[in-house]
Image: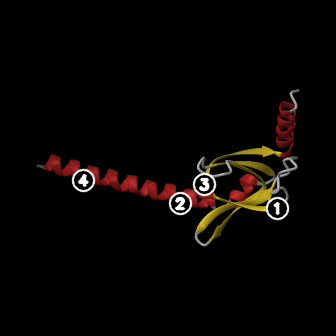
């Protein structure tokens, strides 16, 4: 009987420790989420969106998070993609964080190289 009590007590201790560590992991996430601008500073963000949306990607610079009516958004300036039909270039763009499936961060130089490669591909070079 004492072994059962001992095992039960050990199980409770493990459960309490697990719950405590999960609570701390959540706190760490809150701290990381509170300073996203440092991660995005000086970068161009290529945002990959939910495939059910009409637009599958956005390209933003000067990105930060904002909350609007309880919903979290990435907000940034539409990056200059050098495309004449890119009406978002230079305009403030809001992207619902719940629609983001991933993102790629590039330096300005890396983004310029990416655009050159796309232009060369489009022109058959």
Q: Position of residue 106 (x, y in %)?
A: 78, 44
> What is the count of numbered marks?
4
Secondary structure beneath dot 4 equals: helix
Q: Name the disc covering residue 9, or none.
A: 4
- 38 w.r.t. 123: above or below: below
Q: Give the residue number, with chain letter if any, for mark 3.
A: 99
Query: Residue at position x 86%, y 37% from top?
Result: 113
Q: Nearer the viewer, mark 4 or mark 2?
A: 2
Secondary structure beneath dot 1 equals: loop
Q: Position of residue 119 (x, y in %)?
A: 86, 36
User: Which image quarter holds the C terminus?
Assistant: top right
Label 3 Cα neighbours within 10 Å, binned few <14 / some 14-19 / many ≥20: some
CA gap between label 4 and label 2 equals 27 Å
CA gap between label 3 and label 4 equals 44 Å
Q: Position of residue 97 (x, y in %)?
A: 62, 57
CA gap between label 4 and label 1 equals 60 Å
Pick the residue in front: 72 or 19.
72
**Which mark sits nearer the N-terminus, 3 or 1?**
1
Q: Give the residue number, with chain letter if any, for mark 1.
A: 91
- 62 w.r.t. 47: above or below: below
**Which mark sits nearer the N-terminus, 1 or 2?**
2
Q: Name the disc covering residue 27, or none.
A: 2
């Amino acid at each position: 009987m004492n072994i059962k009590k001992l095992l039960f007590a050990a199980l409770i201790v493990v459960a309490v420790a697990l719950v405590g560590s999960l609570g701390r992991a959540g706190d760490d996430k809150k701290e990381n989420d509170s300073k996203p601008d440092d991660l995005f500073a000086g970068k161009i963000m290529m945002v990959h969106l939910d495939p059910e949306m009409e637009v599958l990607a956005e390209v933003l610079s000067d990105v930060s998070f904002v909350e609007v009516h309880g919903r979290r958004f990435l907000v940034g300036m539409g990056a200059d993609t050098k495309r004449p039909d890119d009406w978002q270039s230079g305009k403030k763009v809001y992207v619902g964080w719940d629609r983001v499936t991933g993102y790629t961060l590039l330096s300005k130089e890396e983004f310029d190289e990416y655009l050159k490669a796309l232009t060369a591909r489009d022109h058959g070079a």
